[in-house]
Image (cartoon, grey):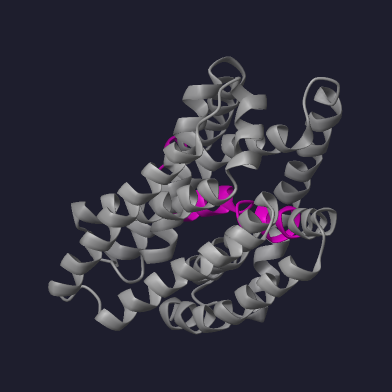
Amino acid sequence: MAYIKIVKYKEIGILITFFSLWLSVYFAKPSQEIMAFFFIFSLGILHGSNDLKLISKVSASSKSIQLVYFFSSYIATVIVASLLFYFLPIVALIAFVVFSAFHFGEQHWNELLNKNRNSNRFYFLNYGLTVLFLLFYLNDSATNDIIYELSGFTLSSDTYLIFFLVNVIVWIGQSVFFTYKKYFSLQQILFEIFLVLVFAIVFKTATLIWAFAIYFIFWHSIPSIIEQQSFLYGEASIRTLKKYINSSFLIWLISISSILLLYFWLQDSASFLPVFFAFLGAITFAHSLTISSMFRMKNKK
């Protein structure tokens, strides 16, 4: 089962995270950023490149006209998100953080909270916001540089800290309640709190982009690829990974090409990181909706 594979992967993920921490100590900022973009452009973009196949699977029992509607909605979401980043960057940034937080939380906790409970969504969101605002607070200067180039605004370090403290307190409170309800064990919660402490050490030591890559790749993208393989092919293995890569390759190539073209088109007026995160934000909206549909279909079985 995918759940067993995810649990085993988390054990490996701890080791990978500590190894990444070692790299953060011994490699300078340029080297960290090269490693970060290598992983994001490969595994990071790849994990979101199979969305159209996932949509086909989710809507397999739907009529052709409904399938066209799903595909059209996906493309329209990307376009609208792109326009938001161009015309209303503040609104787009807030939406990007909220959607990303929920998406990260849903991926991380879905197998532990696989029953339909309305409180789950708030839990997913709070966990994701805890991780993101921890990252922002511990890299506040670099975060503000990106926000300023995208929108012309900045936030104080105290603001990031307040958002983090509010979300982590609410998340821990929800976790205590869910443990009391026996939704999961105390051991699982203690492990996840320990994991957040590990993230804090890594986020403090690494550059913003490398810190983001460590979480995004090793604690989100790879587990997501495992889940998607299980959903599409019934198992996660080397054989299904090859199928996954083959079906994702064209969209992955188009995505990478689009990022590079967008950068060269805007290189006179914008640095690469804001352009990159704007692009990532545009595709995150549609991707998160697709993955939510996948989890809803899995949980009904």
Q: Residue furthest left?
A: 181
Tell me residue 23's x, y (percent): 75, 70
Quadrant of the image occupied by residue 196: bottom left
Instruction: Out of 201 and 113, give the one closest to the viewer.
Output: 201
Quadrant containing the C terminus in the rendered view: bottom left
Residue in the image at 60% along x and 48% along y: 139
Q: Is residue 67 visible?
A: no
Q: Is residue 284 visible?
A: yes
Quadrant containing the N terminus in the rendered view: bottom left
Region in magenta: 39-67
Tell me residue 27's x, y (percent): 81, 65
Tell me residue 164's x, y (percent): 39, 49
Total marks in image: 0
**Relative vertical location of residue 113 with respect to residue 70 in this rendering, above or below:** below
Q: Is residue 15 left or right of residue 256?
A: left
Q: Is residue 173 left or right of residue 212?
A: left
Quadrant of the image occupied by residue 168: bottom left
Is 38 contained in the magenta span?
Answer: no
Tell me residue 127's x, y (percent): 37, 56
**Relative vertical location of residue 215 with respect to residue 134 in this rendering, above or below:** below
Instruction: Out of 152 and 97, give the one closest to the viewer.
Output: 152
Residue in the image at 57% along x and 53% along y: 53
Instruction: Out of 148 and 74, give the one closest to the viewer.
Output: 148
Instruction: Out of 94 and 157, give the one closest to the viewer.
Output: 157
**Relative vertical location of residue 112 with respect to residue 254 in this rendering, above or below:** below
Residue in the image at 30% along x and 64% along y: 299
Q: Is residue 27 left or right of residue 47?
A: right
Is 51 contained in the magenta span?
Answer: yes
**Chief secondary structure of the magenta portion:** helix
Residue in the image at 37% along x and 65% along y: 109
